[in-house]
Image (cartoon, rainbow, N blue to C red):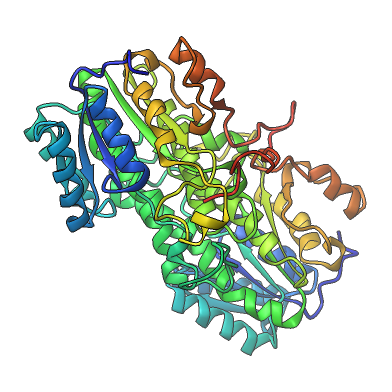
Amino acid sequence: MSDINLDGRAIIVTGGSRGMGREMADGLLAAGASVAVLSPEADELEATAAELGAAHGGGRVIALASDITDYDGCMRSVAETVAAFGGLDGLVNHAGIGPLQVAPSVSECEHVDFWVADPARWARLIEVNVIGTYFMARAAAPVMIGRGWGRIVNVTTSLVNYGRLNWSPYGCSKAGIESETLIFAQDLEGTGVTCNTIIPGGAVRTAFVPKKMHSNPRLLDASIMRSPMVWLMSDLSDGHNGQRFNARYWDAAADAGEAAAKAMTVPAYRVPPPRANLGEGQGP
Amino acid sequence: MSELHLNDRVAIVTGGSRGMGREMGEAIIEAGGRAALLTPEAEELKETVDQIAFHHGADKVMALPYDILDYGQCQRAVTETLENFGALHGVVNNAALGQLNVIAPGAEDTNCKFFEADPFRWAQVIRVNVVGTYHMCRAAVGHLKDQGWGRLVNVTTSIGTMQRGGNSPYGPSKGAIESETLVFAADLAGHGVTCNSLIPGGAARTKFVPEAYFTTRQLVEPSVMRAPIVWLFSDLSDDLTGGRYVANRWDHGADDPNLAAEAAKEPPVFNPPTEGRLD
């Protein structure tokens, strides 16, 4: 992927202070982009931004200490990015609360039956994942539409998790985001801005997974997100809109177009039946 | 469906004061059950409950003037239903905010581009629909599991609404609820409590759509929900869980309601991964 050049491109990566978010930020910086890493965890964020700045040049990294459930904060983050880098070309909607964070006690890190989950934490996950993703897209889209080019990439999860034992509300939140991707993509048609989904394709060695499992060789490495994200943020992905890519199947040895074709998945939702029937599919 | 008798079974129907919710509440009562109608719109609720009580008896219906966004109020709704009726057999999660909450007043259709929507109104639709549905399931499920029999029915929408431009936030909210149905059904396996989705099969003639639609579009009558909801609250649907039923495909002439249900059933809204892949 070293041949893809993102020089001059400005990209926000939410949840950018660690895990897959940090890897994507690092990958985009390595390809020449300027990156605003966003997270409400200010200390970790500052440390990450400083390290990324030291590695790639401080002028290309800013830290946005903000919570995506605060819409004014999202607006401010977009404005700060534009002020720092002279524009905004991409948004990686990666920040989210993980599947192990709804047990009644913070120390219990496990998947639970929906009636065991703490209702306030269950609701908070929906707020962050479904609404936070929308808030960032809502705040960023007008700037990119005004520039006639842009990318929104939503990070979701494997299809099996949308109907999986004990996977509420995480699976449900990501199912909602899959629908956001498909709908936002069509809302954006003709603007030069696209909206796509990327998944890692399995459990990843990040804070989403209990530390004691990190030695499991079956876990994916967060770095698998780098190459597909660089491609998604480049001109090479022009015309790809409302699609879904699986980083697990990205072939680093192939050229980017071929790698993308291999990584592309079925849509998250079944194709609707024809609209000819009585009222069928005409929602709401 | 007249042969189905619900034997005093009790259902909480959210959004029960009008439209499809009211139809489902009345259908359950007419089939021999009882209904606790829930909505924060207290005035309309009182009117509806008074009318139903007049026709069917005051012991068949009750009002729950509560907001599903508040988990404490959901718990109170369950407690009051149990105190008043001495029983609870399930929840019909019908209450929802729709596109009317985000489009401009008087707009010709319900399409809304996400980047033009009022973010705070957009967010509220997700909260009420996704979290509210969960709150009611969460508040009721303890009692249902304890008695070893229960029904959670989530009303969602046509699959196209979850993927066509202009349909956010309603489409994403219902996509998330489809996932709730599947996950809750899996969580409840072996407890005697089922969780299914029920959809009208098209835009229904209710206050959920702009009034102009009543004359300009072919709409589904809210009464299509009656037969399927009675079947879902009967013993005939025992063990049938994680399904998605399309009400306007229900064959009222079928001798066996289970055959009508089978014919009205759709596969899950989510694609399975391609064979051999972890998508």
Q: Nearer the viewer, residue B250 or B11?
A: B250
Q: Does the image show residue A69?
A: no
Left/right of residue A78 with respect to residue A72 in the rendered view: right
Q: Residue B197 occupies which quadrant of the picture?
A: top left
Which residue corresponds to the image point at 37% horizontal and 21% vertical from the top-left?
B231
Q: Position of residue B137 (x, y in %)?
A: 31, 37
Inspect this view and state whether residue A277 appears: yes
| Residue in the picture at 87% in, 63% down | A236
Quarter of the picture holding the N terminus of chain B: top left
Residue B48 picture location, percent across and down? 20, 47
Residue under the image location 61 percent in, 75 percent down: A140
As drawn, A270 above or below B64: above
Of residue B140 and residue B25, the one placed in the foreground of this image is B25
Residue in front for this viewpoint, A274 or A109: A274
Q: Nearer the viewer, residue B201 or B150?
A: B201
Would you say B106 lies left or right of B163 here? left
**A255 left or right of B83?**
right
Percent of width and height locating residue A188: 70, 67
x and y, in percent, of residue B274 in the image: 74, 31
